[in-house]
Image (tube, rainbow, N blue to C red):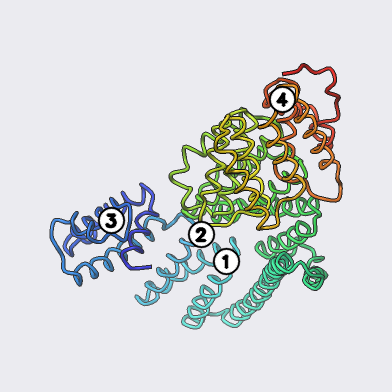
Amino acid sequence: MRPQSELFSLIRAMNKQEKRYFKLYATAFVRNRGGNKLTELFDAYAALDDGRDEAEVIKRLSHAPTPRQLATARYELTNLILNSLATYNAGKSADADLRAMLAHIQILYNKGLYEHCRKVVSRAAAKAREFDYFSYLIEILAWERKLLLRQAGAHFEESLRRFHEEQLNLLEQIAATIKYEDLADRVQEAHRAYARLKGASARRKLDEIVQSDLLNADPDGLPFHARLAMFQARGNYDWFAGNVSAAMDNYRLAIDAWEAQPQHIRDDPDNYKRYLTNFLSCAIAIHEFDDFQETLRKIKALPSASVESDITVFGIVTYLELVFYLHNGKLDEARNVVSEFEAAAPRYVGRLRPDRLINLYYNCSMIYFLSGDYHGALRHINDILNESNAEPKRDIQEFTRIFRLLIHYELNDFEALENMFRSSRRYLNNRRQLNNFGKVVISAIRKLLNAADDNERRNIVKDLRSALLDILQDDDSADPLGLIEILFWTESKLRNRPIGELFSRGIQANRGRDKRELFTHSLDADSKP
């Protein structure tokens, strides 16, 4: 990234409070060293839409700097911003506190103020132990030793022995944490290899890792971060192995560990959120929603420690809410979440992970479709097709092509459909993705276009419903994306009732039951369209 783009990105990542603080900081500390010029440069970059447009930056300045002067000013401004952010965030976390304390310790020691220095060392050591910040504790203990040797007293030998015992105990805790974090990382990497290779050897490697005696140790005797790594390793393995209930139990244990020490949540809310979202992903997978909304409230109430975290949490929380409301047949609530997503999209869409963005578009399109709003559904189908930063997953590739045909049929856009039939079939055939579900739906839509009257259309929809029910009853294969939704669409046509009403009533009446029970009734007595 070019220097001007780096500076632009840094300024763009600052929130309003940080920008305001920077202005105060720059005015107070660099007034006599070009501060006004640096704040002017700051405002010029803050007003840009694209950090690469250096000519636009120069145009906004009251003076025309040479390229060398501009490069120097960019460097100074970058450092000034970073210094202001460091000051702004001081005292907002144990990590920041410890960094500041170590700087204070160095200053006091250099000034020969050893008694004052010892007090700060003692406070810093207590905070580092409270948060299991072992890297800081090593440095703090080095200062403690330096002070101990500097001022040997009456109990020098006893103090020195206790000091070395603490060092050895610290090394044991560090070793335990490293072992468990390494175990959790190896479970994650082995799963990635298994997911890529789909081979027995990769699966065996994953199974061998979790045979470790480390996973059967008593978690109560472990340092906080080692305990979290143990639960993460167990939970991830169970998730990868398909034992979602066991994974959920382990993620719950990790959450309990966090909540037993709330100071860790205050200091590292982003990591805590990760365990909460893992828990909710399990809840969705097994339709266990007792603690879902309360856990979601916890995530929303937590601050974000970084812009990246704010973006990630927005994407994950929006996705979880949409899926939760779909699973519970609450379309009105789901539509509200879609509206919130669409309102916030300009701030987030370009910065969300492409795969996560595609999943959001997919769920938004489903909610519009089930609500009978086909224009809204088509808008998000086109968003998926226009997402150039990532190739959608195979199931979503098929979904978009099939649903686009169905939506254009509902919108009576018959002129565009013929070309879409050819392009969709060609696209899916080239990728060998047109499975039985796709063939059945595409064939039915083509027949509907050519149907002579309402009675023939009804029979076509009835045949489609029957074929889709056969696919639903097949236990040997996963249900294609959109299968349930198109079945509700057929119900809507055959019963002459709104699709949203049928979906909400069907899902809520059959909550906790097998999805096959949604469509076991007879249609013989239903009214005709």
Where does label 3 land, which residue? 45
Identify residue type, mark 2: Ala
User: 235 or 240, which is in the foreground?
Assistant: 240
Residue 174's place in the image compared with 270, above or below, is below
| Closer to viewer: mark 2 or mark 3 | 3
Identify residue type, mark 4: Lys
Where does label 4 land, which residue? 493
Coordinates of residue 98 in the picture (x, y in percent)? 48, 64
Tell me how far mark 2 sits from mark 1, CA to CA: 9 Å
Coordinates of residue 419 in the picture (x, y in percent)? 57, 43
User: Which image quadrant: the N terminus?
Assistant: bottom left
Compared across the picture, whether 473 is left or right of 34 comes to: right
Tell me how far mark 4 sits from mark 2, CA to CA: 61 Å
Determine the image quadrant of residue 496.
top right
Q: Are marks 2 and 1 in contact (CB under 8 Å)?
A: yes
Q: Is residue 290 in sight in this rendering?
A: no
Labels 2 and 1: the sequence-earlier one: 2
Tell me how far mark 4 sits from mark 1, CA to CA: 62 Å
Labels 4 and 2: the sequence-earlier one: 2
